[in-house]
Image (spheres, rainbow, N blue to C red):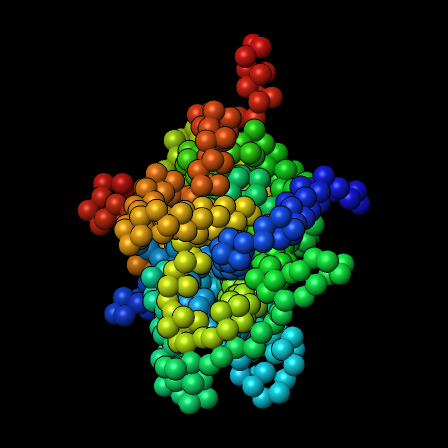
Amino acid sequence: MKLPVRKFLTFLIPVIACALVPVFVHNDYLMQVFFRIILFAALGLAWNLVGGYAGQLSLGHVAFFGVGAYGLAMFTARGVPVWISIFLAAAAATGFAAVIGLIVFRLRGPYFTLSTIAFAEVLRLGAANLTATGGAIGLSTPALFRPRTFFETHLLSTVQQFYLAAVTLAAVCFVINYATSKSRPGYYLMAIREDEETAAAVGISTAGYKLRALLISAFLTALGGALYGSAFQYIVPDSALSIEISVQMAIITMLGGAGTLLGPVIGAILLLGASEVFKNRFQESHLLIYGILIVVVVLFLPEGIVGGLRHLFRRGMKSKPPSSVAQSPAVAEAKGGN
Amino acid sequence: MAAILELRNVSKRFGGLRAVKDVSLDLSPGEILFIIGPNGAGKTTVFNLISGFLHPDEGSIAFFGKDISRLKPHAIARLGVGRTFQIVKPLPALTVLENVMLGAFMHTAGLPHAQEEAASILDFLQMSHLKDFQARGLPLAALKRLEIARALATRPKLILLDEVVSGLTTSEALALAELIKRLPEWGVSVVGGVEHVMQVVMKISDRVVVLDYGAKIAEGKPADVVKQPEVVEAYLGAKYKELAR
């Protein structure tokens, strides 16, 4: 098989460019903003598997995010090394996803969405009331990174290292999205999104494929949650299990283009970047502008930015099918020749 | 020859309505059987029962001797039962080619292979020129063909065509009928369902089963069946049965 070198480079070059940002940017505030943007790009990509390709509008992904963050704190508190804790927490989130997936995927449309919210809220309320999770006071999370020097001279601050970890996670999420979009499982998920009965009629086990997408998505989301928890050093139910995070994952992806590869990345850059700029310029009223931006995009680009652009690009080429249907060009030509 | 599909005394109830009453039928390999009957006669219910979207309350359905009456739709599809939907169900955001590839994925995981196979099926259905269009926005005649193409791509042994010509003009319907007649070349047996496009039924079916209010009222060669008084009555009412004589 021929190696798709060009595709590999178009992926690798932006990743390396992102990874080199800390060499030039030493401002911790800016690095913090970049960390959040890249982290949410990764979360958007993780959500995209379920909400985009499979078309299952989950608003409960913060459950996996929260299990990742809380899991990291709780495993390390019991003496497990941090880097093992992270993956244990992600595994726990995956197990949790298997349980709730079996239940929520019995429902469709708005009922599915509501049930995902309900599960996430149960976790939030549980975390706020149990002593093991620190109740409303929360837990402190272990530091994944400390400032360190490399090459004797350069200092990598904690934030810069968190940023690099987020870049790594986002790259992994991107590769998984790419592999999905170019393979049979990806097509199966899209078929499920477009019409579940048709999908079943061509032999697709719709429940099985939706569940698999959710398990992978939950694992990645939990890794993101653990990074987030560790970066902010402290988690409470209203931060690590807030519905706002679920909504943000969904909005970022839908704004950029659900079910597209670049959508979540573009959505994260635009939405979080804009919100940061507005926050500095307009203080409290930034939420208003943020809201208006979302409304405008939803109204004018229902398929998101990438989906909208793709539509524009397709127009004029392949959007209007010819009115004669059953004739192959050859038949039409033969008739014309007579 | 042994029947590939056997329905034995199949009944289905929706609340107080008995949609299918005690229906039995057999299908031989390579046969084209059409189920006809007026609107509401239970044709679609029979298709949903065979393809696993519904399960019978009574009776059994066997496919190559294996009882399939409790299996899920995707499992039945994997055994070799392809189906189309009366109200066409394309995957609108995907292209025509991709729609058909989804059928081909049943026996190949490779994209290029699925593409090739989908292309040859689109060729058979004379819609190669549409392959790169999104399924959304295609005219009905193309969507009806797309339903068949997608089902055929799963390499079924039996294909269920529910109202496959309804809503088409006569010339479109007859053109499609020619293609359906050729389906046995692909190793497929056909059970079709048609409400009133008799021209198509007469032309391509080996055998006809007539349903009325969920019960089988006649069966046989198409030309014989349409002359039976019960059939005329089912379609036109008792009053016209006299006139038809």
**Residue A11 x/y as whole percent:** 66, 45
Residue drawn at x 54%, y 54% as measured from the top left:
A27
**The N terminus of chain A - image quarter:** top right
Q: Is residue A223 left or right of residue A268?
A: right
Q: Is residue A244 left or right of residue A174?
A: left
Residue drawn at x 27%, y 66% as measured from the top left:
B17
Q: Is residue A279 left or right of residue B63?
A: left
Give the vertical position of A268 relative to B118 (above or below). Answer: below
**Residue A60 x/y as whole percent:** 41, 67
What is the quadrant of residue A55 in the picture?
bottom left
Residue drawn at x 63%, y 67% as measured from the top left:
A147
Q: Of A146 and B158, which appears nearest the observer?
A: A146
Say if residue B69 shows up in the picture. Answer: no
Q: Is residue A147 left or right of residue B228?
A: right
Q: Residue lying at the far left in this picture: please name it.
A: B239
Q: Residue lying at the far top in this picture: please name it.
A: A338
**The C terminus of chain A - image quarter:** top right
Residue drawn at x 38%, y 60% as measured from the top left:
A247
